[in-house]
Amino acid sequence: MTEAPVVVEGVSKRFRLYHERPSSLKERILRFRRPRAEDFWALRDIDFTVPAGQTWGLVGPNGSGKTTLLKIIGGILRPTTGRVTTRGRIAALLELGAGFHPELTGRENVYLNASILGLSKRETDRYFDDIVGFAELEAFIDNQVKYYSSGMFVRLGFAVAVHVDPDILLIDEVLAVGDEAFQRKCFDRVDQLQKDGKTIVFVTHAMQMVARICDQAVLLESGRMQAAGAVDEVVKEFRQVMMRRQTGLTEEAATKEVEIAGVELLDAKGRPGAMVAPGESLSVQIELKARHPVDEPVVVVGIHNARDEWVFTTDTERLEVDVGRVDGTVRVTFDLNAIPLLEGQYFVTVGVRDRDHTATYDWHPRRYPFDVVRNVKGGLVIPVEVRVERPERARTELD
Amino acid sequence: MSASDVLVRTNEAPRFRVTARLRDLWTHREILANLARKELRVKYKSTLLGVAWSMLHPLLYLVVFYVVFTYFLPSGIPDFPVYLLSGLLPWTLFSTALGGATASVTGNAQLVPKVAFPREVLPLAVIRAQTVNFFFQFLVLVAFLVVFGYPLVHRGLILLPLALVVLLLFVAAIGFATAALNVRYRDVTYLVELGLLAWFWGTPIVYPASLVANNLGDTGFSIYLLNPVTNIVLTFQRAIYGGVSSEALGELPAPGLRWYGFRALAVGAVSAVLLYVTWRLFFRRSGDFAEEL
């Protein structure tokens, strides 16, 4: 294991957040007191080893320290404690087109960017046509980059990035760019790198991507390692974390003091059958049952889409609805009016917790599917009313 | 996989070893070359005259100073244009390289937090680009000498490579320090700007050193000669201007080459020691640049 390409041992990272850090000598001299600083631990006690030839995903919610960890592995930041050992040439793709200068031509920027990412001039010469072809910019490569559209800019940056040829590749979310066809090419390229035995560490919060390309994964939350190992386990853990963040609920901890006895999804006309059109309403009817009387439980409703992206959550506390005392059976109905969702399959989560976030009574994550069927096209839903008038008749009368 | 591919990173800044740093810079020489090229290309992109500007610059200076010091404040220096250019060109290299190096890390605030490479590359790329500019400008001087029939080849020229190397050592030594300090205290940029203004007039470029020797006396002149840039500029002047005529040689503090060679070597030795100190400072701080920008 000592020969593993990436070994992270007990790594923590502290950032000093300065309130009005003196950024000039004058301030430094005039203010004798040391500047007030607050410690922020972006990472705490991270340990893992990536064996040669494997692809690992670093996952976690925003602000969990994924990128900081990647920067420490890549040698951009220093760990505050612990150590990172890497063996082999590293390329860190933290930004597309790093060092691109708008006044330079595409060609000049390719060479500049490639050298920054660690490609030699000879390698860049060899890959140059591939890079330009990959970016689909043959006709514009000698134009200044300032005349490029943002799409062209990103494609060129990406084309260089995927041609780097290190032993260890660190990727920060950048795969999530471009249209579908371009993403396909990117995945093919990652497949190729994996076949070539490269070691890849990959930061993302797109779970389907982790499942698709990673051998193992590490879950970070608030700078701590919550899970590491098989992708399925980590992804499951990640969903728990996200759910907890969005709703304050966890599955295991369900105490069943109040149970969710039944959930029914009804369309606008009150029919069960979980099918609605964009803009129509959906009612979530929840039957709660308590063995002993419970005061003021909070009922939570959430919606995820088919890609497991969380789209919506609300609860009775936020809506300032008092459920009151639950003794025996109580029915709580959420009328979701004018659902602005696009065509696709969705899953409703239902949960019950106490007021103080200390106990989860019951919890049904993404258990109730419903479909939104097409009656409009496009990327959003606009409430539309259509009027049909016949002005010809008025004209005829005038005649 | 070579041993240099194994990297261990902890909170401790790695030990500063010159050979290891040089090896690291050598493996990253293409970034250095490309950043220097960018520096040069970006400057004159979208200009009609392009790189000719870097040659026009000393010519325009020459015209201004020539008019001022021939008609308004006659200096009485023989062959004044040659005198002026042989001091002005190294000074321009010094001041542009130092100013550029100071801002080199802060000026790449998008790059530094995103990519790992030896940070020394940033100030060194500026110094390299300005050295290339210096060679273009030097062509102007050579053309001037040819057009006005001055002797091109003479013994003093052997001082030229020495003077240039010492100048580069000195500017790198100062530049590493100002570049590193500027990350935390942006005042350094302004201090350097003001400092260069004062430094320009404290260096014999538009006036002869002999004037200072006459006005200040021996002790004053010795103090004046403590300025490293003065010694470097004098060496350039001896190498170029000193060869054009015997009156020209008379304007310089000493006729022999040895006086200059010795002084240039002394400045070089001091610069080398200073460079070790400031490079170390730069290197030890560079681990935090990504965080502080």
Image (tube, rainbow, N blue to C red):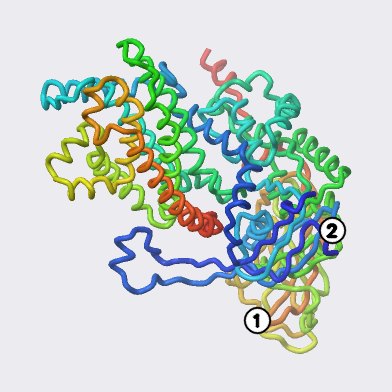
- Dot 2 falls on a residue whose secondary structure is loop
The spot of residue A46 in percent (x, y) is: 71, 69
Q: Is residue B22 above or below residue A359?
A: above
**Residue A160, percent from left and from top:** 69, 35
Q: Residue furthest right?
A: A195
Q: Which is more foreground, mark 2 or mark 1?
A: 2
Horizontal and vertical percent position of residue A232: 86, 61
Amino acid under disc 1: Glu
- Is A295 drawn above or below residue B178 in the view shown? below
- Residue linked to disc 2: A51
Residue under circle 1? Answer: A296
Q: Residue at x 57, y 34 (%)?
A: B33
Left or right of residue A235, residue A296 in this image: left
Question: Could you tell me which residue is drawn at 60 percent across and 61 percent down?
Answer: B15
Query: Which of the pair A65/A242 is nearer the observer?
Result: A65
Which of disc 1 and disc 2 is earlier in sequence? 2
Q: Amino acid at mark 2?
A: Pro
Residue A305 appears in the picture as rendered: no
Instruction: Work out which residue is located at the far bottom of the displayed protein and give it.
Output: A292
Could you say which quadrant of the image residue B256 lies in? top left
Tell me which chain the residue with mark 2 is part of: A
Viewer can see residue B26: yes
Dot 1, how many residues are within 10 Å of its Cα: few (below 14), some (14-19), or many (20+)?
Answer: some
Image: A290 above or below B43: below
Identify which residue, A23 or A330, lies in the foreground. Answer: A23
Residue visible at 60% across and 20% down in the picture: A142
Q: Disc 1 on helix, strand or loop?
A: loop
Q: Quadrant of residue B207?
A: top left
Figure quadrant of the N terminus of chain A? bottom right
